[in-house]
Image (tube, rainbow, N blue to C red):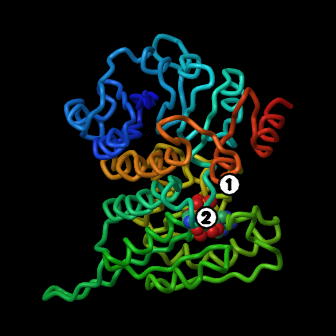
Amino acid sequence: MKIAVAKEIEVCERRVALIPDTVAKLVKQGLEVFVEAGAGEKAFFTDADYETAGAKIISDSAQLWSEADILLKVSPPQTREDGRAEIELLKPESVLISFLNPLGNPVIAQQLANRQITALSMELIPRSTRAQSMDALSSQASLAGYKAVLIAAAALPKYFPMLTTAAGTIAPAKVFIMGAGVAGLQAIATARRLGAVVEAFDIRPAVKEEVQSLGAKFVEVKLEEETVAAGGYAKEISEDSKKRTQELVASHVKNADIVITTAQVPGRQAPRLVTEEMVAQMKPGSVIVDLAAEQGGNCACTEAGKDIIWNGVTIIGPINLPSSMPVHASQLYAKNVTSLMQLLIKDKALEINFGDDIVDAACVTHGGEIRNQRVKDALQAVAV
Ligand code: NAD
């Protein structure tokens, strides 16, 4: 059975799906691993490193795609420079494992089903204890949370820690984190390590203890509706609750030197948490880093992929932050996909077992069908 690692063609994608260490482990299990030439170069893994680990390097990209039994990627398949869609290169009935964004771009699921591909979407791995080692959303969100704080610190015209010097005392920076999921919690920990005073807010009350255990103050809003959906994710809240949360957070945004927003509701536009009026109230020189920029932004002023200055406030809307740390992002992602593959391979052969809840949840297409109802609904909504 051939496991293939594709070179990413998305311009800002520097990650690679397997690193040499994980290749060596798969080869030790008796599996054949093929790596596209240059696949790891943007993450500082050379073809020679992969060869030493036991992989075969393939220069012909079309050959790699068309011969793979399991094709591994990070970003969703794209259209290549020669105009051919990567999905069209896949062998029918082969397996594709990648981030696929099937709720945001359900058309991809239809294309994969049409090609009879068994596609497993890393976004659809359940957030359960058993699936923790495969949870790429968490491994990558954690990198993003860390990097968001470093970006904010670099843009802030101030120190982070409190300093007492011969030239006077410096007050610590005030950081307000909105959304205390995986990225938000890592952002809290990073900002605390740099010496900031940190506050955090989330509509899921369950995160209060985690926030406090990291040394931050939890800004609590009591809403008269359920805010948690299946799987522990946040639900989209009513207009009334949105208004109440905005009123509550306004003063915290105003007083912050740095606001880092990470709030997401799966399959929806990111909730709007910071309005133009709130930004107008912030001190000049303050910084907002909006990790939801690609999903429409948590801040009204965010422009995805841009740093803008609005009323003296710097608003940064980074795209694909995990890719800016490709060494560790690839290392963690490689562990995630390798753990998932262990559920799909028995005695060196493919065995897709839908009795396994992780395989069942992650597998978005199989046998020419879209298997996930939410993806089907999203596809229908696009078609209307
Ligand atoms: P996410 O990226 O979907 O959202 C980030 C945060 O934004 C969440 O904490 C969410 O509650 C918050 N949010 C959404 N709307 C908001 C609003 N209007 N105002 C303020 N905050 C808002 O979340 P995630 O980081 O991927 O985590 C989702 C869930 O999965 C959490 O319950 C997390 O604890 C859980 N999880 C479980 C495991 C596990 O058990 N193995 C692993 C990872 C995550």
On the question of residue 366 being in view, the answer is yes
**Given the image, on which type of amino acid does mark 1 rest?**
Asp
Q: Which circle marks residue 128 in the picture?
A: 2
Mark 2 residue CB less than 8 A from any atom of ligand 1 = yes
Name, please, the residue furthest toward the right. Answer: 384
Q: Quadrant of the C terminus?
A: top right
How many discs mark residues in the rendered view?
2
Q: 324 or 88, which is in the foreground?
A: 88
Q: Residue at x 61, y 48 (%)?
A: 295
In the figure, is residue 19 to the left or right of 311? left
Name, please, the residue furthest toward the front. Answer: 347
Q: 74 or 217, which is in the foreground?
A: 74
Does the residue at mark 1 contact the one at mark 2 (Cβ under 8 Å)? Answer: yes
**Given the image, on which type of amino acid does mark 2 rest?**
Ser
Q: Residues within 10 Å of mark 2 (few under 14, many from 20)?
A: few
Q: Is residue 207 above or below residue 14?
A: below
Point out residue 337 in the picture as x, y percentages from the top left corner: 47, 46
Q: Residues within 10 Å of mark 1 (few under 14, many from 20)?
A: few
SS state under label 2? loop
State which image quarter holds ligand 1: bottom right
Q: Which circle marks residue 321 in the picture?
A: none
Name the residue that disc number 1 marks: 357
Q: Is residue 217 above or below residue 175?
A: below
Q: Is residue 153 above or below residue 197?
A: above
Q: Nearer the viewer, mark 1 or mark 2?
A: 1
Q: Residue at x 42, y 29 (%)?
A: 4
Point out residue 28 in the picture as x, y percentages from the top left corner: 32, 42
Q: Residue at x 33, y 40 (%)?
A: 23
